[in-house]
Amino acid sequence: MKEIVYNECFACGQNNPIGLKLQFEYEDNHAIANWECPQQYAGYPGLIHGGIVSTLLDEAMAKIVIKNVGEAVTGKMSVTFRNPLYIGEKVTLIGEISEVKGKIIKTKAKIMSKDMIIAEATAIYIKTRTL
């Protein structure tokens, strides 16, 4: 399945002037992106805002769903924050599909910095249409 491009998306849109501009690669049924945490997404001093951390996880899961199953929306997501994400830190996002049952897709994702888990998530996506 060819990857769909969403140029205005806050997370992956390359034309969104305030977006994260994430770029994913796909291997072994994983969506993988590397990202360096810029100052403009700060929460507390020196730290990336938790909402941005959640967005990174959501996007990693959404990308693998769209790539392998089709367009879907987030139905439910649970995030576990394990370590702070510091401004300037280089991280890797990894999303994968756990299970597909009809229109329901279960996923999981993590944000890694070197060998440390920053945050993890599980989610349920609901397929909206076939691309």
Image (cartoon, grey):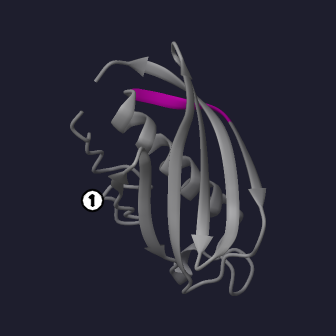
Residue 75 magenta-highlighted = yes
The quadrant in which residue 70 appears is top left
Outermost residue to the top: 102
> At x 25% / y 41%, what residue is drawn?
3
Disc 1: which residue: 15
Horizontally, is 37 left or right of 128 in the view? Answer: right
Q: Is residue 92 above or below residue 125?
A: below
Is residue 19 something that shows in the picture? no
Foreground residue, 30 or 58?
A: 30
Q: Is residue 94 above or below residue 36?
A: above
| Residue 114 percent across, percent down from the top left | 58, 80
Q: Is residue 78 above or below residue 112?
A: above
Where the C terminus falls, by quadrant?
Answer: top left
| Residue 113 percent across, percent down from the top left | 60, 76
Indicate the amino acid at tag 1: Asn
Residue 35 magenta-highlighted = no
> At x 21% / y 37%, what residue is drawn?
2
The quadrant in which residue 116 appears is bottom right
Foreground residue, 61 or 7?
A: 61
> At x 51% / y 57%, what residue is drawn?
94
The stretch in magenta equals: 71-76
Horizontally, is 107 left or right of 83 in the view? Answer: left
Query: Is the residue marked by circle 1 packed among few (<14), some (14-19), or many (20+) residues within 10 Å?
Result: few
